[in-house]
Image (tube, rainbow, N blue to C red):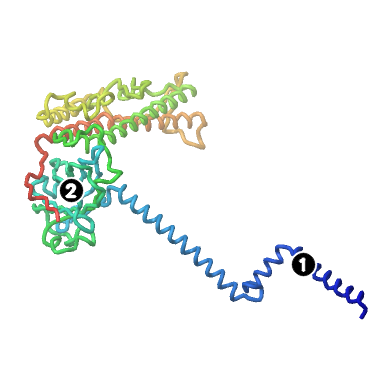
Amino acid sequence: MARQDMEGLKNHKTSEGRAEVAETEKTPLTKRLEGLRDKLKLGPHHRMERFTVMLGTTLSLLLILTAFSFMNHRTDVAHNASAQALYTEDFNFSLSNEKMHVEGIFGNDDRTDVMILLRMQNPTAMSTDANNYELFITGMNSSLSYEPNVTFSLFGTTGYGIIRFQNDEPIPKELADITIRSNSELSAREGSGSSGDRDSTDGSFAEFDQGKLYVNPGADDVETLDWLKADEQEPTVLYTALVAEQLDTEIREDIESEIAELGQLLNREKEYTNRLVSGGYEPPKMPWFMAGDYIDDDGRFIAAQDLAGAHTIDYDSKTIRDGYINQVMSDLSLFDSYMEDHSEIEIAVKSDDTRREQLDRIDTLKSNDGTVLDLTSVSTGTSPSAQVAAKDSVENLQSTWRTYLSTKSNLQRNLMHQLLILDADVQSQTSSYSIQSNQDAVTFY
């Protein structure tokens, strides 16, 4: 082969190599990834290998997510444990089967003085003397890390009582296991020997009348009573702050509701009266217990005449902190005689025909032209629509009057009476309040 031919062949091979390198450099990125896929055996011809890799990746992600969820759950549980004060809402005593409710947990700002408010469902069946009870206190799974001064007291026959935790330092956020033992048996044994909890089935619950509750007196959501001083000992102040103020608020809400109802009934009475006037009839006379009444611009009910037996006390500018009894009597000792005299006055006034509270049926209606409409003969479908409308207006008027009388009676008699009774309960605490005086009656274990 000639020299130049050899050179030509050589140059041909060199140019082919250069072309291959150039082609390699021009290979798209996707081609390179496909090559990597084939090397890792993840291509369409390696289904098993591809499935294994996908399964491993999925399991790894699930494990990571589970770990994060568990960590978040533990954080939430820890937060709830420190925040939640009330764990037991009610419990039974093991032998008498009497129920006690946990009404709330209250304390001062720094949680050095915390009170657990209890309420007996049936005070007549349980002792109302705190000295007839013992307390046994421990932690949820072990003893408490602190040992506060704990007292148990009862607000007489109201059925309310408190377990009080007092400590020099803020009470720790720990769940307390409290057993209350009643040493005074007032009712037949009907209980199961348990307090309704799996942790209250030891032998002592079958031997003694006991109840168990769980609370966290150092929790974040213990309700703060701003105006109650720490270490307050005055029973009337304690009862007002823990019990009476809430009950006072509830009664006053009922009062507001009744006043709103009276306002609506006054408007309704006016509407039906106007319908009769527009129809050319003389409306029946408004009954004495409604005539002249109105609701003022401040939403207060102003009665032209009070019902017999009404308790006329100032509930607008006064609250249970101010008291109500002092408005109608000089001393709590006069309460029974006041109520008795009040009942006698109510009976005497009701016999007065001018203050009757019964409504006679209206059978006739006088028109402006002097004619009289017999309402008993008016019926839908056979009488003129104007007469039917007049009869409906009269019936609606009488229904409105009856409802008004009932509502006004509830306001002036029942709700005002409830305020007086509430104040009597407050003032009676000076003599009926009891506190467990035996230091050995509280045991920590």
Locate the C terminus by quadrant. bottom left
Determine which residue is flagged by label 2.
122
Q: Position of residue 439 (x, y in %)?
A: 8, 47
Residue 128 against residue 96 in the figure, above or below = above
Numbered disc in front, either 2 or 1:
1
Say which residue appears at 89% left-offset and 76% top-offset.
Answer: 6
Q: Amino acid at mark 1?
A: Val
Q: Is residue 129 left or right of residue 374?
A: left
Q: Is residue 227 left or right of residue 26?
A: left
> Which residue occupies the foreground of this view, 215 or 69?
69
Q: Position of residue 246 (x, y in %)?
A: 26, 36
- Please say whether residue 402 is visible from this viewpoint: no
Question: Could you classify mark 2 by the number of other residues whose Cα lies within 10 Å: few (under 14), some (14-19), or many (20 or more)?
Answer: few
> Which residue occupies the foreground of this view, 199 or 103?
199
- Checking the image for residue 360, the label placed there is none
Say which residue appears at 12% left-offset and 34% top-offset.
Answer: 428
SS at mark 1 in the image: helix
Q: Quadrant of residue 418?
A: top left
Determine which residue is flagged by label 1.
21
Cα separation between marks 2 and 1:
99 Å
Q: Quadrant of residue 48?
A: bottom right
Residue 425 against residue 75 in the figure, above or below = above
Q: Quadrant of residue 53?
A: bottom right
